[in-house]
Amino acid sequence: MNKTPKEYDAETKAYFETLPKMIQENIIMSAPDVNCKEDLERCVQNLLDNQK
């Protein structure tokens, strides 16, 4: 089961909280499989690449 931002480890949660609200909401809605900060960084990069 995918983790919600509340379930992220401290480092991943801290990074998530620095993201713009629009990106945070998109991540919450898409419920990606995030297990570490690097997973979240890849997810953010994919979102940004798809917005081009």
Image: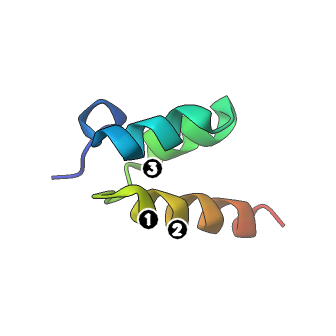
Number of callouts? 3
Name, please, the residue furthest toward the front. 11
Residue found at x 45% / y 49%: 30
> Which residue is at a point 61% across and 68% down the rendered structure image?
46
Q: Nearer the viewer, mark 1 or mark 3?
A: 1
Residue 26 numbered tag: none
Quadrant location of the C terminus in the rendered image: bottom right
Please tell me in which quadrant of the rendered image residue 18 appears.
top right
In this orientation, which residue lies closer to the viewer: 32 or 45? Answer: 45
Cα separation between marks 2 and 3: 14 Å
Q: Which residue lies furthest to the left in this view?
A: 1
Front one among 42 and 52 = 42
Tags 2 and 1 touching, CB below 8 Å? yes
- Amino acid type, callout 3: Ser
Pointer 3 residue: 30
**Horizontal relation, residue 20 to residue 30: left or right:** right
**Residue that badge 1 annotates:** 38
Quick one: label 2 or label 3, which is nearer the N terminus?
Answer: 3
Q: Is residue 47 left or right of residue 33?
A: right
- Looking at the image, tell me whether mark 1 or mark 3 is earlier in sequence order: 3
Residue identifier under label 2: 42
